[in-house]
Image (spheres, grey):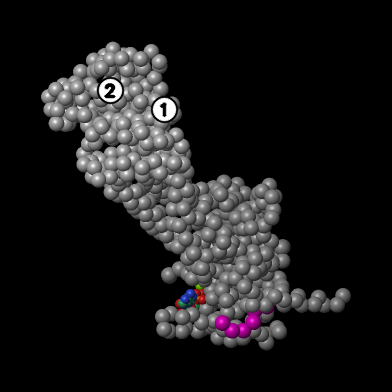
Amino acid sequence: MAPAEAPPILVAIDNLTKSYRRGAQIITVLQHVCLNIRAGEFLALMGPSGSGKTTLLNLIAGIDHPDEGTLRIAGVDISRLSESELAIWRHRNVGFIFQFYNLVPVLTALENVELPLLLSELPRRERRAHAELALQLVGISDRKDHYPRQLSGGQQQRVAIARAIVTDPVIIAADEPTGDLDKVSAQEVLDLLTRLNQELGKTIIMVTHDPRAAERASRLQHLDKGVLNACAVDG
Amino acid sequence: MFKLILRNSLRHRLRTALTILGMAIAILSFGLLRTVVDAWYAGVEGAAADRLVTRNAISLIFRLPLAYLNKIKAIPGIKRVAYGYWFGGVYIDEKNFFPQFAVELHNYLDIYTEFKIPPEQRQALLKERNACVAGRKLAQRFGWRLGDIITLRGTIFPGNWELVLRAIYEGAEETTDETRFFFHWDYVNETLVKNTPAVANQVGWFISQVEDIERAPLIAGQIDDTFRNSLAETLTESEKAFQMGFVSMTKAIVMAIQVVSYVVIAIILIVLANTMAMTARERQEEHAVLKTLGFQGRHLVALIAGESVAIALMGGIVGLIAIFPAAHYFRTALGNYFRVFTVSDETLLTCLVIALIVGLLSAIFPAWRAARLSIAEGLRRIG
Ligand SMILES: Nc1ncnc2c1ncn2[C@@H]1O[C@H](COP(=O)(O)OP(=O)(O)O)[C@@H](O)[C@H]1O
Ligand SMILES: [Mg+2]
């Protein structure tokens, strides 16, 4: 048997630059970043606080617009999409996991997971079924009628993961998903991400501070003061 | 989505409850003030177009000689003429105020066909010199029965005036005033002839019914021309204009009420707008999360506007429900001054529309901000 071909490049970042304006001051957060990510990779993005990890992740997830450079994801240059095209693109392609879970407090676990599906054409019954399935996948179906404040941090993060995968996105973007969790809960969340990567083939990009979290990744990238040049590694 | 709007609005129960209460009070006040204004104008609306009122050109308080009657009657196109004046007596106590008129009843009742009197009562009324007739509501108010003696203490015409209630009229329509009180002008005049002949044989106004409404303005001019250059010149106008003149004495007050009613709405608009802005600001991060999930500006606009309109309408509906008992209270307390005090459908509709508009306007700024919010900005946490 011939050796398996390397999977295709899913995310191609070239010469990406992003700066923020703070008053009269312009802070350049990312400088000419180059990075390729293959489909099915589990990438950990590390680096000191303020190095621009969140900014880079936001750009990949289509949450923010770059100033310069290209950002191709599955062949689409998302830096050229309009605001509403980008919203639709995000809904179809990205699941986002936040450090502080960011569930909607007035909705139950199930309703939170169902939320992204409200944007689809799915009838109510199917939305419910999808959401229940996602909750089952993260192992928290028994808490589906609980409100976020009735759940522990680890449980909330699992609900958040269910919400991120319910639309079956290609990419899962996680910004310090274990940053606010105790050790045991953090392990559970990481186990879950690993399973999503290995069993469901999701491409995961995870920003983290935690070396134990980084260990789970299939690849590690360091971002230092907004500089990252990884195009050459496996371009 | 509706569930989210509803749950969002119940998030700060106290705040929402207070806002709804404020909205309810504002709408209630607005509705009541409108109804007061309507009640003022109801007098004008009831006026018929085929009636002309002739009064002294200088002022309502100056009288006209009775001798004008025949000259007016002689003008072609006039069907009937009645006359009378405002009596302004006190029944037992000042607070028992009701409108009293001493009129030439025969023609007057023929002109005012909206005052319906059974034929035998009418006969009795016209026969007796000190007979009087009261509206149904007025009779009810004082528990008067036919045959009762009603004594009025004159203010303009001194003395005690004893009258016998011989008829009770009913209004032909719902808006017909059933609180009036009439008796014979002759009865007053007889006494004046005896005691103060200088002021006898005078009337406050003539009321003429014209045959052809179209020609009413022309006839009004002819009446006034007849008395031009005489001692008491006349001013003739349609009954509607005449009553408008009455109302215009208090027009400034009516205007003030109108202004206040809008001020109340402006205040609640500011309150609700502030509440919504505060709420949206608190939920900035949540809005950023929704956007991350793929929700767009227009979804957030719907979410915020939906909540704002829901609160405004809830308040509006509570206010409208409260308006009926409040109006009922007004009617019992002040019914003597306003002949109709009913909340019109138009007022109800206006209240609802205003609640809706207040809800929408309040949402504009926060919705615009939420729509424009950059996700990266909204998600950023200090620390
Ligand atoms: N919206 C913004 N406006 C201004 N400065 C920002 C904004 N977002 C991030 N920054 C700045 O950019 C730098 C990198 O931020 P971030 O990407 O959040 O870093 P990290 O996630 O690696 O801690 C920081 O100095 C931060 O203050
Ligand atoms: Mg960060």
Where is residue A58? Give x, y as percent.
57, 73
Q: What is the magenta range?
A: A67-72
Query: What's under tag 2, amino acid-wise?
Result: Phe
Q: Which residue is mark 2?
A: B183
Label 2, residues with CA under 10 Å away: few <14, some 14-19, many ≥20? many
Label 2 secondary element: strand
Residue B69 magenta: no
At 60% from the left edge and 79% from the top edge, which residue is drawn?
Answer: A221
Above or below, A52 relative to B256: below
Where is residue B294? Give x, y as percent.
61, 63
Q: Which residue is mark 1?
A: B114
CA–CA distance between discs 2 and 1?
A: 17 Å
- Please tell me which residue lies in front, A227 or A130: A130
Label 1, residues with CA under 10 Å away: few <14, some 14-19, many ≥20? some
Magenta stretch: dominant SS?
Answer: strand
Chain letter behind tag 2: B
Where is residue B103? Give x, y as percent.
29, 27
The reply to whether residue B251 is visible in this rendering is: yes
Where is residue A138? Give x, y as percent.
63, 56
